[in-house]
Amino acid sequence: MVITNRDHTLLVEKYRPTTLEGYVGNENIKKTIAQYLDQNDIQNLIFYGPAGTGKTTLAKLIALQLQCDFTYINASDERGIETIREKVAGFAAAASFKPLKVVILDEADFLTIQAQASLRNVIETFSRSTRFILTCNYVERIIDPLQSRCQVLKIIPPSKGDVAQHLAGIMEQEGVSFQRDDLKTIVNQFYPDLRKCLNTIQLSIVNDGLKGSEEDKYLRIDKSVLVSSNYMTGVLKELTQKKPSFTNIRQIIANANIQDFEELYRFLYDNANVYASGSEGMVAVYVNEYSYQANFRIDKEINAMALIAKLIELAKPRVI
């Protein structure tokens, strides 16, 4: 039986676990967290790993289990030093009737270097009363002084089998009929992003019962909305063609409806040897330049496509 929160209609929130028992995967980390919760205290923590694998869920779960005052800040939206000085330090300094307070900094790898340096001092100043939980996709973007003040834990995605079993349990509890092949398609398409799997399931639920009836709900996959989370693989495949097409790559990215290109920039850098062998240094220069410029661009897609145009030049076969 999957634990539900009936106050929500969105599946990702309705079935967000509120206890360690309901959290899927990472059994060793769950044991470590359970020991902290038994002591009614935790260390400062950094959770890192792929998107949609439960980092934020685990952070909120800990705060709820501690029954403490906590604040949540999305560092991708509030990434500057003012956020640390005003919101974080202000919360940590405020009086509380509870022995412990928790600050959750989601997507902390978006924090500026200055903000991270300021956070280091805040962690030390309020070490007696406040704990900090940082989540990020790329732990290497967190400065070493912050990492040394936290216990760094890698969130490993549960297996495809565990994800499929969890999703099947949710659909059974929702009274949704489904074909195993459809469930397999969703898992293969979006793994390890459990959040995308649930959102796609909710989008694909069809109700053929009477108006207002909860009967006759079933899962029907619309292939046109199944945009692969691995769109980056399509970009890489096009870059390795004899004549890479800017138009084709633009269409791949447009179809994926991407708003944040940080993951794509990293992917292009990590796979430079695949499409630009011998020019990896120039790839690093271009990726660094355009990922920095993205911070000052309103239309981030244009910035990303400008980078693609540069990389296509590097990917073209050399005439000897």
Image (cartoon, rainbow, N blue to C red):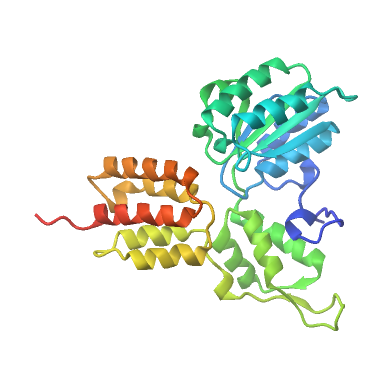
What's the residue at 75%, 40% (across, down)?
A: 60
Counting from the top left corner in percent of width and height, residue 166 is at 71, 57
Counting from the top left corner in percent of width and height, residue 4 is at 83, 55
Locate residue 304 relative to residue 130 in the image: left or right. Answer: left
Locate residue 32 relative to residue 296 in the image: left or right. Answer: right
Residue 40 can be seen, yes or no: yes
**Figure quadrant of residue 31:** top right
Locate residue 264 relative to residue 152 in the image: left or right. Answer: left
Counting from the top left corner in percent of width and height, residue 209 is at 82, 82
Q: From the viewer's perspective, is residue 115 above or below residue 314?
A: above
Q: From the viewer's perspective, is residue 94 above or below residue 76?
A: above
Locate residue 272 relative to residue 48 in the image: left or right. Answer: left
Q: Which residue ends up furthest to the right in the rendered image?
A: 97
Please count the marks in the image.
0
Image quadrant where one finds the C terminus: bottom left
Give the camera-side residue of 216 and 250.
250
What's the residue at 46%, 46% (across, down)?
A: 294
Q: Which residue ends up furthest to the left in the rendered image?
A: 320
Give the camera-side residue of 134 and 163.
134
Give the camera-side residue of 201 and 38.
201
**Figure quadrant of residue 1:** bottom right
What's the residue at 39%, 60% (across, down)?
A: 235
Q: From the viewer's perspective, is residue 48 above or below residue 273?
A: above
Counting from the top left corner in percent of width and height, residue 298 is at 51, 52
Residue 45 can be seen, yes or no: no
